[in-house]
Amino acid sequence: MQTLAQWPSPNDLNFLDRSETSSAIPNPDEYIQSILAWAKEKQAGEYFFVPLEEWPPREEYLSSLPSYPISNSEKVLGTSSLSYLLPPVLFGNKLCIWTTDGDGKSLTDSYFHVLEKIGKAEAQLSGFFGEEIQSILKIVWKEEEKHSVSYLLEKKLWGKKENGQRLSSPLSPESAFFVGSLTDIREITEYELNTETNSELEAAILRFLFKRTNSKYFSLLGALGKSGAQDRFVILPKTHFSFGLQLLLLFTVFAEAYEELVSLWIEERPQLKDALIKLEEWTHKESHPHSESGMYAIFEERIVRLLDKYSDRTDRFLLKRLEEEYFRSKKNLISYSTERKTEIEEKLIPDLLSQLDSHSKLKFPEDLQSEWEKIGKTLQDRLENLLSERKNLLIPSSEGDGKSPESWNILIGQRSD
C-alpha cells in the first residue's frame, strides 16, 4: 500500500453520548454508520470487514475479501463481531473495519492482553506505594529525516530532529504498536524505551524493570536488536520480524518484571518509608547467567510459555507466529531480489556501460586528464559493485519452514537489508 493510511480520531466519530464513560462499547450499527460517514468525507470508495488477525492488511489479502460501497450501510458482518482494539483505517479509498471471531487469538489481541497485565501490576503498585503508578513505559523511535512520507510528519507525532534523524514524541505502547505496524520497519532505525516521569519512585521502578529484563532475558533482547548500552534501553529493530511481534515479545518480558516486583513487595511487605531503599536493593540483586544465543533465544521453551502466559493463550502462539513471519519474510526477500536483479540488469548496468563508453571516447587537455581518469575509475568501481551485488543476490530455496532457529539463520544470512 503506497499511500499513507488515514484513521479517525475519537472526536471524528459520533457513536455514543460523550457523557458516557469512554470505555463503553458502542452500538455496532451506530459505530459503522459513524465510520462510513467519516470515510465518505475522506473520499473512500469501498469498505471491508477485515479479521484482526490480518493486521496490518496486505493489498493482496484485501483483494480476496468481499467489499461494499461506502453508500451501503446495511449490516453485512455475518457471524463476526466488531473489534474496537484498533481504529478503522483508510488505505487510499479502501476502508478497513476490524472484526473478531471472539476467540481473541490474534497478535493484536495478545499484545493488548500483555499491556492489560502491565496495567494491573501498575495499579497494584499504586496501592502499595500510595502514589499513582501509570503508564511508565514510553517509546521513542528514530527515522531518517530524508523520509518525507512519514506518519510522524503526517500525524504531527515527531518531537525533534538531530543528526539527520527525526525522533518521535514519546508514544504509549498502544500508539507505538499501531503507528509502527503501519510504518515500513526498514525506516525505523532504532527505538528506545524511556519515561517522561519526574517521580523518584517511578524512576526507581524503571531501573528495576530495566535491570531484570536486561539480565534475565539478555539473549532474547539481543536477538531483538538491543544495543549494549547499560544506561539506556535502545533497540535496533530486526527487519525480518514484524514490528508488532517485536513489541509483543518486548512487553511480555516487562510484564514478567512487573509481576516479579509485585511479588517481592507482597513477600517482604517493607515500610512505605523504605520503598526507595528496597527498590534499589532488589534492583542490585537482579543478576542472572546469560549468553549470546541469537535466534535460539526466541525459540526457548521458557519464552514460548512466557508469551502464552501473559497473553492468555495456551496454543504456543510464538512458534505459530514465527512460521507465519518466516514465510512473509521469505516472500519479501524473493520479491526484493527479483526486482533488484531486474533493475541492475535492465537499467543500472546498461546506463553505466553507456557512460563508460562515452567516457572512453572523449579526450581532454593534459591538465584535466587526471580528473577525467578519476571519473572513469569511479564509473568502473560502480560497475564492479553492481556486478558483485548481482552475483550475491540470492533467491531463497524452497527448503526451510521457520520452525527452527537454523532455518531462520539461513534466511537472515541471505538478506541484505
Image (cartoon, rainbow, N blue to C red):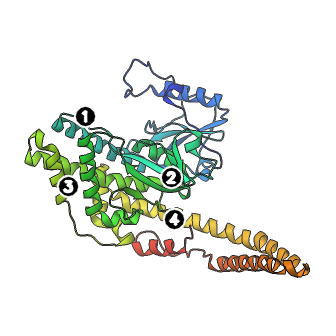
Q: Could you tell me residue 248's position as x and y percent?
A: 38, 53
- Disc 2 packing (10 Å; few <14; some 14–19; many ≥20): many
Closest to the camera, between mark 4 and mark 1, is 1
**Quadrant hosting residue 390:** bottom right
Query: What SS does tag 3 mark?
Result: helix
Residue located at (65% from left, 76% from top): 389
| Residue at mark 4 | 327
- Disc 4 packing (10 Å; few <14; some 14–19; many ≥20): some
| Residue at mark 1 | 132
N-terminal label among 1 and 2: 1
Residue located at (66% from left, 39% from top): 93
N-terminal label among 1 and 3: 1
Q: Which mark is residue 283?
A: 3
Residue located at (9% from left, 44% from top): 270
Query: 348 left or right of 203?
Result: right
Please tell me which residue lies in front, 416 or 112. 416
Type of amino acid under label 4: Phe
Q: Are marks 1 and 3 in contact (CB under 8 Å)?
A: no
Q: Could you tell me residue 159's position as x and y percent?
A: 50, 42
Type of amino acid under label 3: Thr
